[in-house]
Amino acid sequence: MLPDSENQANQFAHIFQINASPGGVPKLPLARGEVTQTGLLGDKQRTTQVHGGPEAALCLYSLERILALQAEGHPIYPGAAGENLTIAGLDWDEVKPGTRLRLGHDALIEVTRYTTPCNSIADAFVDKQISRILQDKHPGWSRVYARVLQPGQIFPGSRVFFE
């Protein structure tokens, strides 16, 4: 059993993993990240007509949702769904358009919309059922897009706060 101080530290919402790629998925883990007005420095999107831009600068997903999907038998893992930030310990039901999140000490983002899953992430789901994380079909299971209000440095373990 962990000492009380470690148990309490593990209860705080934090960045579990920072993910980027030169284009496409899966996105791979980074040791640190620089959040800019246009997104995560070094991350690229293959289909820029659909992904990226100021209103979809970052894609976020919940570690707890990923673990629950794994328990259902889906081969998803952090970064496989194309998210830039895999967040642990955050009440994902409270993450909706208009929500502002502080990432670490500096970065501030605002959720703009739920994402629509595309076929590029199909390998992360049994029978390629990407609709499993479609907000209209399974409320609360979608990834979200966010705009950057204030850039900053982030690291795995950086705290995440509702603003």
Image: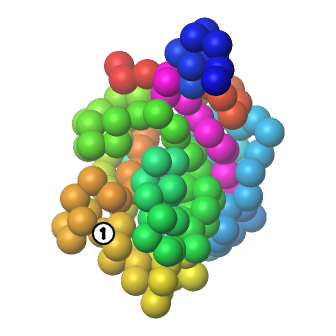
- Magenta region: which residues? 11-20
Residue 158 placement, left or right of 134: right
Residue 17 among magenta residues: yes
- Classified by dominant secondary structure, the portion drawn in magenta counts as strand
Q: Which residue is drawn at 55% across and 29% down?
A: 14
The x, y position of residue 53, in whole percent, is 48, 54
User: Residue 80, percent across and down?
Assistant: 60, 66
Near-viewer residue (30 or 45) = 30
Q: Does 86 appear in magenta? A: no
Q: Which residue lies furthest to the right in this view?
A: 31
Q: Where is residue 1 in the image (x, y as percent from the top left)?
A: 64, 24
Q: Mark 1 points at which residue?
A: 134
Left or right: 118 as drawn, with respect to 3: left
Label 1 element class: loop
Q: Is residue 151 above or below residue 3?
A: below
The quarter of the picture where residue 47 lies is bottom right
